[in-house]
């Protein structure tokens, strides 16, 4: 069965905000946030420096929350800048080969942020994905989907190519099954982390109003923006 191959493909469909391209070792091609910001255009360097400040302030809070809620996980977050040319505004969460959680921001997203609250909220959201162990849950769902669809294709007389196609389809469906729930869970916990770090999650969530609304698509990976903002509002009110 091609489950291992399928999982390699599904690793790109992360629990985070979007898709991440990784190196063979599993670590994003990225620059540590402590590196100079000389590669960033001069008119954007102010927000780049603000990004470094957010990292220094929010990462310890996210780590403490991780150790409290998920003591079995590696909570030593590595926050990096994806410095590949031409990358769109994006942030994502993954892990390296040792299990260390990595949160990566593209330069375009840092430049697009209007304030530190938006950067902090996105960062907290991605940290929450790791704390909630969404990546591993998504892998399990993908594996189960691949097995079930592959078996169905086999018992109905499909050849090896048909079974492989069914496995790939099953893995994709499985990976997306609870992705909207994962996003809302990350929004909820991200709100808590951002607030505890001293940022305004409601102001940070205004970032959603500037990105395309995915609506409520069948097998979509993200819930409607209005639903996400409402989760942030409810959580902040409870705080």
Image (tube, rainbow, N blue to C red):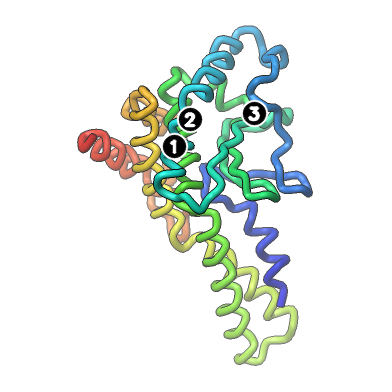
The residue under label 2 is 60
- Tell me which corner region of the image, top left, top right, bottom left or bottom right, holds residue 91: top right
Near-viewer residue (12 or 35): 35
Q: Position of residue 141 (x, y in %)?
A: 52, 66
Label disc, if present, on residue 64 of the rendered structure: 1
Label 2 and label 3: CA atoms lie apart by 18 Å
Q: Which one is closest to the eye, mark 1 or mark 3?
A: 1
* Above/below status of 149 relative to 154: above
Mark 3: few/some/many CA within 10 Å (<14, 14-19, 20+):
many
Label disc, if present, on residue 143 of the rendered structure: none
Q: Position of residue 71 (x, y in %)?
A: 47, 50
Describe the element under mark 2 as helix, strand or loop.
Answer: helix
- Tell me which corner region of the image, top left, top right, bottom left or bottom right, holds residue 199: top left
Kindly identify the residue that appears in the image at 72 percent across and 16 percent down.
Answer: 39
Describe the element under mark 3 as helix, strand or loop.
Answer: strand
**Are dots 1 and 2 in contact, CB under 8 Å?**
yes
**Are dots 2 and 3 in contact, CB under 8 Å?**
no
**Are dots 1 and 3 in contact, CB under 8 Å?**
no
Q: Which one is closest to the eye, mark 2 or mark 3?
A: 2
> From the image, which quarter does the N terminus lie in?
bottom right
The residue under label 3 is 81
Choose the circle earlier in sequence order: 2 or 3: 2
> From the image, which quarter does the C terminus lie in?
top left
Kindly identify the residue that appears in the image at 58 percent across and 16 percent down.
Answer: 48
Q: In this view, does 77 lie to the left or right of 157?
A: left
Mark 1: few/some/many CA within 10 Å (<14, 14-19, 20+):
some
């Amino acid at each position: 069965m091609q489950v291992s191959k399928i999982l390699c493909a599904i690793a790109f469909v992360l629990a985070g905000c979007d898709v991440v391209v990784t190196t063979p070792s599993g670590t994003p091609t990225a620059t540590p946030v402590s590196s100079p910001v000389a590669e960033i255009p001069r008119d954007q360097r102010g927000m780049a420096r603000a990004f470094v400040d957010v990292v220094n302030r929010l990462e310890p809070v996210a780590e403490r929350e991780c150790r409290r809620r998920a003591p079995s996980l590696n909570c030593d977050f590595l926050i990096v800048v994806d410095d590949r040319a031409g990358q769109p505004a994006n942030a994502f969460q993954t892990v390296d080969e040792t299990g260390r959680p990595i949160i990566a921001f593209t330069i375009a997203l840092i430049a697009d942020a209007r304030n530190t609250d938006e950067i902090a909220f996105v960062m907290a959201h991605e940290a929450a994905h790791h704390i909630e162990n969404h990546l591993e849950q998504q892998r399990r769902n993908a594996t189960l989907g691949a097995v079930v669809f592959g078996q169905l294709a086999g018992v109905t007389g499909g050849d090896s190519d048909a079974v492989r196609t069914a496995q790939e389809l099953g893995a994709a469906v499985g990976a997306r099954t609870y992705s909207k729930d994962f996003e809302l869970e990350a929004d909820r916990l991200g709100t808590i982390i951002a607030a505890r770090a001293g940022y305004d999650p409601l102001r940070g969530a205004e970032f959603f109003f500037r990105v395309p609304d995915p609506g409520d698509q069948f097998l979509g990976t993200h819930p409607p923006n209005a639903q996400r903002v409402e989760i942030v509002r409810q959580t902040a009110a409870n705080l």
